[in-house]
Image (tube, rainbow, N blue to C red):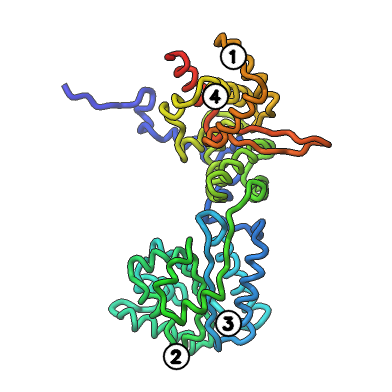
Amino acid sequence: MLKYFLPPNRMGEGGYEHLFDSIGLSRKIFRDETVLFPDFIPPYLPHRDAQMRQLIDYFRVVLESPGKVSQKVLCEGRVGVGKTAVAKLFSSLLEREANLRFGVKLKSVVVDCRKERTLFSVLQAVSSSLDPYAQIKGFSTRDIHKMILEGLEATGTSLLLVLDEVDYLLLSSGSDAIYELTRDEKGASRVSFMFISRSSAFMNSLDESTRSTLLHNRLSFPAYSSLELRDILTQRLPQAFVSGSVSDEVVGQAAELAASAGGDARLALELLWRAAKRAEEDGRDRVTPEDVRVVYGDIEGVPNEEELASLQPHMALSLLAIARALAASDRDRLTTGDAERSYAAVCEEYGVTPRAHTAFWEGLQELRDLGFISAEVRVEGKGRTTVIGMNYSASGVAKALESLIKSR
């Protein structure tokens, strides 16, 4: 006989209404989680002053000689190094300053070429931004481009067009798309460009004139260091979180892991957001370094059994000791002294004679080289000490190693 499922104690409520009960109530950890989203652009971007100054220098001609020169700039760098954030912040500032301070009519439009992959869709996005009521249905790509240029010329308006992830446009439409956008025709001098790319390799497909310009106007975005990522995360703490819910150790853990993955600020922000979500879903009011390690494992993967099984016995015991010590504390790092004491305790538990200090230290270096742990030298007082972190869930690694050692 067919039976229909009705959730217990929820028959009169439809079953799911209670899931909305907590919305609108005060939260234990988050104050405003959107501050950690990629689309959020703060009014100041730590460690990107040099790039902002360079962009102002490149585009000053747009303010000094409006409508006479088309400027073109290439911003390049790997994912998560602030290219899009800088471009969006700069373009909005340029538009505001042009209109309010310099008396120059200027509009800025940012187009994400991951979504708009054809010249037609790019121009459609530009047209809609300049005039939401423009009737472009049935017109060709060339016609829409001409209408945009004529509109700019007629109103005495300059345009800064930012093409984010321009590589996708080239892959879909070829180099002719850039040629058509930048070709010299009436009104073209009113349009300046900022091309954002992960690599300058795409320039090889451009025409010689455009390529020559971009070779001189290239702005590089280096990967963020761990300390720089700390500053980026720290800047957002007051807006994003309830006071006291996220410690310096948690911030340091997220920054260190994101730095080891290529200096990716987006990853650092995502780690902090996911870790806080994990803690809040558990009903806690504080985020721990282990929360960060766990969600990093979810994103980047965790060491599999073969990787752990390949470790020499004492290296496995050393890793177990570090994992246990970190899992049992709220710290993101251990000193080598703490790690060695934990190692001695683990060796005693398994009836193994610990290795001497030098051999233990060499094992740590190998674990670091294999990517299981991180090791950073810190200056404390008049001395220097090495602190050790873990690139995966400490409790997860400890559990896996205990099972592996038991099976051996």
Q: Residue 16's spot in the image, x, y percent?
A: 39, 34
Q: Secondary structure at mark 2?
A: loop
Give the residue type at disc 2: Lys
Q: CA distance from mark 1 to mark 2?
A: 79 Å
CB atoms of marks 4 and 3 within 8 Å: no
Q: CA distance from mark 3 to mark 2?
A: 18 Å
Q: Residue at x 64, y 40 (%)?
A: 251
Q: Is residue 2 left or right of residue 271?
A: left
Numbered mark located on residue 186 in the image: 2
- Of labels 1 and 2, earlier in sequence is 2
Q: Residue at x 50, y 79 (%)?
A: 212
- Of labels 4 and 1, earlier in sequence is 4
Q: Residue 396's spot in the image, x, y percent?
A: 50, 26
- Give the quarter of the figure containing the N terminus: top left
- Of labels 1 and 3, earlier in sequence is 3
Numbered mark located on residue 105 in the image: 3
Numbered mark located on residue 315 in the image: 4
- Give the quarter of the figure containing the C terminus: top left
CB atoms of marks 1 and 2 within 8 Å: no
Q: Secondary structure at mark 4?
A: helix
Q: CA distance from mark 4 to mark 1?
A: 11 Å
Q: Residue at x 28, y 78 (%)?
A: 138
Give the residue type at disc 3: Lys
| Extreme residue toward the top, this view | 351
Q: Is residue 196 left or right of residue 41?
A: left
Q: Secondary structure at mark 3?
A: loop
Q: Which residue is mark 1?
A: 347
Q: CA distance from mark 2 to mark 4?
A: 70 Å
Residue 280 at least partly seen = no
Q: Is residue 296 left or right of residue 345?
A: left
